[in-house]
Image (tube, rainbow, N blue to C red):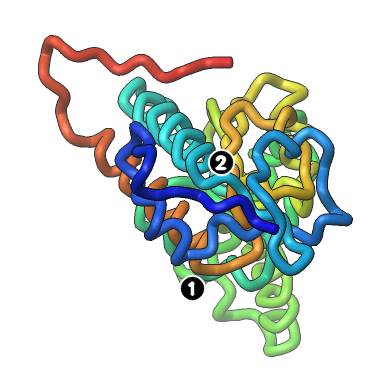
Amino acid sequence: MVKKQSLEKEKVNTKFNLEEMMGKGLHLGHQISKLHPKMSDNIMGVKNTVHIIDLEKTAKSLEEAMIFIEGLFREGGSIVLVGTKPPFRKIIQETAEECEIPYVVERWLGGTFTNHKVISNRTKYYQDIKKKKEGGDFESLTKKEKIRINKKLEKLRRKFEGIKDLGKIPEAVFVCDIYRDQACVKEANNIGVKVVAIVDTNVDPSLVDFPILANDDAIPSVQYILDKLKEAIMKSKIPMPNNIKSNPKSK
């Protein structure tokens, strides 16, 4: 039985509407057999063998994450948006491009953080090849050589296009599925990069600095959270009154 969650009886002190969040499916977790023990306190019940996430806690965790991100950008920090699950690649890339932030929607490249110099050199190599092609440097090559160059460029594009402007290790990373992209989370944790992430009922929230307790499998749920991420970044560009200072939370 699902414990009845009252959306009127007790108002959560956040700007997020619980009914809207429920409509987007943020409350729907995984099958009860997949529950991670450390997520137990964030469950409000079970429906049809699926754990139901406490949306009041979701709203609070989402607000904390967005406050951190807004503060981070106000202080000149940067974040990488990561989500390699195929159904979400398009909306993740679109969000990143609208926010003008680096992104990873293909495979996470090991060493992106922990061996940043090597990855940076490969990114510069990709940009150099891309620039030469756009400049017509390969026009004199044979058809076979052009095909080879194009295949090589496409392979590099899939790896480096999203992080081509990542000039330094970012202060934070936003991960849409920490189970699928656990390599990214591990690298970030190893070198002190803050992790903001959607945390479903099957994963360990203690791996994340700012866990957003929500469904990471449904497109409407992920889209809702990405929209809030975009709002926080756009809001950071609006000048604050002189008597208010940004103070992003740190772990």
Q: Which percent across, then down, holds residue 38?
A: 78, 33
Residue 105, by quadrant, is: bottom right
- Can you say whether 127 is above or below 74 in the image? below
> Mark 2 to mark 1: distance in Å?
47 Å
Residue in view at x 38 percent, y 38 percent: 10
| Whether residue 128 can be seen here | no
Q: Which percent across, then down, holds residue 220?
A: 49, 67
Which of the two discs, 2 and 1, sits closer to the camera?
A: 2
Give, as a three-letter code, the residue at label 2: Ile
Residue in view at x 63 percent, y 25 percent: 193
Return the residue found at the far bottom.
Answer: 143
Mark 1, other Cα within 10 Å: few <14 / some 14–19 / many ≥20: few
Residue in view at x 55 percent, y 80 percent: 139
Which quarter of the rendered picture does the N terminus lie within? Answer: bottom right
Number of numbered callouts drawn: 2
Side of 231 relative to 116 (left or right): left
Residue assigned mark 1: 136
Return the residue found at the far top.
Answer: 243
Side of 29 relative to 69 (left or right): right
Q: Nearer the viewer, residue 153 or 221?
A: 221
| Whether residue 243 can be seen here | yes
- Can you say whether 4 is above or below 31 in the image? above
Residue assigned mark 2: 212
Which quarter of the rendered picture does the C terminus lie within? Answer: top right
Q: Nearer the viewer, residue 166 or 31?
A: 31
- SS assignment at label 2: strand
Side of 175 relative to 65 (left or right): right
Give, as a three-letter code, the residue at label 1: Gly
